[in-house]
Image (spheres, rainbow, N blue to C red):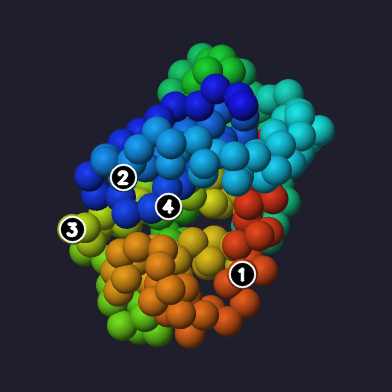
Amino acid sequence: MAAYALVRSRRRRTLCLQINPSGAMRLLVPATTRQADIEAFLKAKAPWIERTLRRLNEAPRAPAFADGLSLRYLDETMRLRLDYRPGAPEVRRDGDLLCVAAADEGQARGALEFWYREASRHHALARIIHYAPLVGKAPKRIRIAGQKTRWGSCSPRGTISLNWRLMLVPADLFDYVIAHELCHLVAPHHRAPFWREMGRVMPDYEVRRLRLREIGTQLSL
């Protein structure tokens, strides 16, 4: 069994294994979970772990951050146009070109991420306005983050956190995450009532869920 990080939480009710794109594994368990139960869970998950790690190893490596890089923007594709020069970083979209001016690669990456974060915030607000009436709940706050192991989360206080990298996946998968987190405002768990709510709001959620899981290993930014 590959190494994994064990995280115990008093708020958790079920065991959950996460594998990020780098292959690092994290096991989330209720605080009182016995070691024997952890080992049994991992044994049952072994085929899935093996398949996932093999898929990660076989996945194409992200292309170099360079002029001409292909960038996703929901259902669109843009080309990166880099201009290294002194001065404050600047990002500007010109048709299918995303022009980034910066002093070096580090600043260019930072400026590009900030641009995507702002774009994800605006898009998330629009989609929440669409889906919140279907769910019957709206978040108290929206937070854009850069989580390493998840696309989104919903806090007990009603804050929905979304990964800015959702702008790099098709729009219908962004919608899946929006609906998923909104449904957590109704059912703050992953038991049957939650999935029933997801099925009511988004009947094809299972297909979208699987596609999002697969595409997560192929992001290039």
User: Given the image, on which type of amino acid does mark 4 rest?
Assistant: Gly
Query: Considering only order in the chain, which callout, 3 or 1, is on the residue closer to the N terminus?
Result: 3
**Label of residue 157 in the image:** 3
Give the Cα separation between the discs numbered 3 and 2. 20 Å
Give the Cα separation between the discs numbered 4 and 3. 15 Å
Reading the image, the residue beneath label 1 is 206
Query: Considering only order in the chain, which callout, 2 or 1, is on the residue closer to the N terminus?
Result: 2
- Closer to us: mark 1 or mark 2? 2
Query: Considering only order in the chain, which callout, 3 or 4, is on the residue closer to the N terminus?
Result: 4
Q: Residue at x 42, y 52 (%)?
A: 152
Reading the image, the residue beneath label 2 is 30
Say which of 194 and 106 sits in front: 194
Query: Considering only order in the chain, which callout, 2 or 4, is on the residue closer to the N terminus?
Result: 2
Q: Position of residue 190 (x, y in %)?
A: 41, 63
User: Given the image, on which type of amino acid does mark 3 rest?
Assistant: Arg
Q: Position of residue 8 (x, y in %)?
A: 31, 36
Reading the image, the residue beneath label 4 is 152
Q: Is residue 194 above or below residue 163?
A: below
Q: Is residue 22 visible?
A: no
Give the Cα separation between the discs numbered 1 and 3. 27 Å
Judging from the image, what secondary structure is the residue with disc 3 in?
loop
**Image quadrant in which the N terminus is located:** top right
| 141 left or right, relative to 150 | left
Judging from the image, what secondary structure is the residue with disc 4 in?
strand
